Image: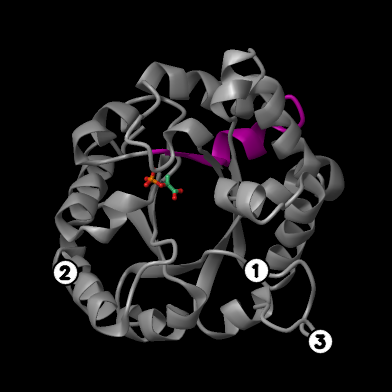
């Protein structure tokens, strides 16, 4: 049985006081989270602050990005080892904003994936197609290309300590959500591909859906057999919304 996971991506939002209020609100509801893992991804400068605020609780800290290199002369970069040192348990890699705005190729994403695992952290590998790719019937090809860039480099067993997040680019921050069966279709393709290489890894792999998830659409998404939780952007900055999403995951958690 796969335990549900709800991860909040704060993107480049936050200030110390606002962060403290947000974490305070989440922690007030923590006992009711049920059988769900909850992670939050603050900007790197606030990782230490958030780690301090959650250390005696159940919320994990997720990095938003890590360098493709180890510590060294790389001004402005933050290594996976530093994120581990500051209390992260996992790091996002291959988020569409990193791919499109910062030019991260599949090869760079794979390199980062390896550095994150080498630092003892769980990579959350984001994959997803653009609207043009979907309309051209390339969804499956794009998603599998992004997945296999990692699998072919590190082997399918590398997915034993990883999470995959399917995030259609056209649904991120747009208010457009994939229909539950549309998302399920892609999750099923991802799991089947992994299963063709290792059935146990596939059945244990948590595949999150991301793209305008909110309290109103979360339950229907979580009811799908291959959707194991959500990567939530905008709605993770609103305590009530985020807690409601976590509760929805808890309600559908036994499978
Ligand atoms: C994200 O940032 O990964 C995301 C899914 O954002 P949003 O929920 O705002 O679409």
What is the C-alpha distance between the residues marked 1 and 3? 15 Å
Q: Secondary structure at mark 3?
A: loop
**On screen, residue 240 above or below 81:** above
Cα–Cα span, label 2 and label 3: 39 Å
Q: Nearer the viewer, residue 233 or 61?
A: 233
Q: Is residue 36 visible?
A: yes
Residue placed at 39% from the left, 64% from the top? 40
Q: Residues in magenta? A: 196-211
- Helix, strand or loop at disc 2? helix
Where 109 falls versus 49 (above or below)? above
Total numbered circles: 3
Q: Which residue is mark 1?
A: 66
Earlier along the polypeptide chain: callout 2 or callout 3? 2
Q: Residue 206: x and y, percent?
A: 51, 42
Q: If the image is split into quadrants, where does the N terminus sit?
A: top left
Residue 72: image location, x then y, percent: 80, 86
Judging by the rendered image, the residue that carries numbered circle 2 is 25
Would you call the spot at circle 3 few (<14 residues within 10 Å), some (14-19), or many (20 or more)?
A: few
Q: Residue at x 62, y 34 (%)?
A: 202
Q: Which residue is mark 3?
A: 73
Q: Is residue 197 magenta?
A: yes
Mark 1, mark 2: which one is toward the viewer?
1
Mark 1: few, some, or many residues within 10 Å (few <14, many ≥20)? many
Q: In the visual, does 221 lie left or right of 186? A: left
In this rendering, does residue 162 appear at all?
no
Q: Is residue 217 magenta?
A: no
């Amino acid at each position: 049985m796969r335990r549900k996971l709800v991860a909040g991506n704060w993107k480049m939002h936050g200030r110390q006081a606002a962060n403290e209020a947000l974490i305070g609100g989440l922690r007030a509801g923590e006992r009711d989270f049920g059988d769900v893992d909850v992670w939050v991804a603050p900007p790197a400068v606030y990782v230490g602050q958030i780690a301090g605020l959650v250390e005696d609780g159940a919320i994990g800290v997720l990095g938003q990005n890590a360098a493709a290199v180890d510590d060294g002369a790389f001004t402005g970069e933050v290594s996976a080892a530093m994120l581990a040192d500051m209390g992260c348990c996992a790091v996002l890699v291959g988020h569409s904003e990193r791919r499109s705005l910062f030019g991260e190729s599949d090869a760079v994403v794979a390199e980062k994936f390896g550095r994150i695992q080498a630092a003892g952290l769980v990579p959350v590998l984001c994959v997803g197609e653009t609207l043009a790719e979907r309309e051209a019937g390339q969804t499956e090809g794009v998603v599998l290309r992004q997945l296999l860039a990692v699998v072919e480099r590190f082997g399918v067993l590398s997915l034993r300590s990883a999470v995959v997040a399917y995030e259609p680019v056209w649904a991120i921050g747009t208010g457009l959500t994939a229909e539950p069966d549309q998302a399920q279709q892609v999750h099923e393709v991802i799991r089947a591909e992994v299963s063709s290489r290792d059935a146990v890894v596939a059945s244990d792999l948590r595949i999150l859906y991301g793209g305008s998830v909110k309290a109103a659409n979360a339950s229907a998404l979580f009811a799908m057999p291959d959707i194991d939780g959500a990567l939530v952007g905008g709605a993770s900055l609103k305590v009530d919304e985020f807690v409601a999403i976590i509760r929805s995951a808890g309600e559908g958690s036994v499978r």
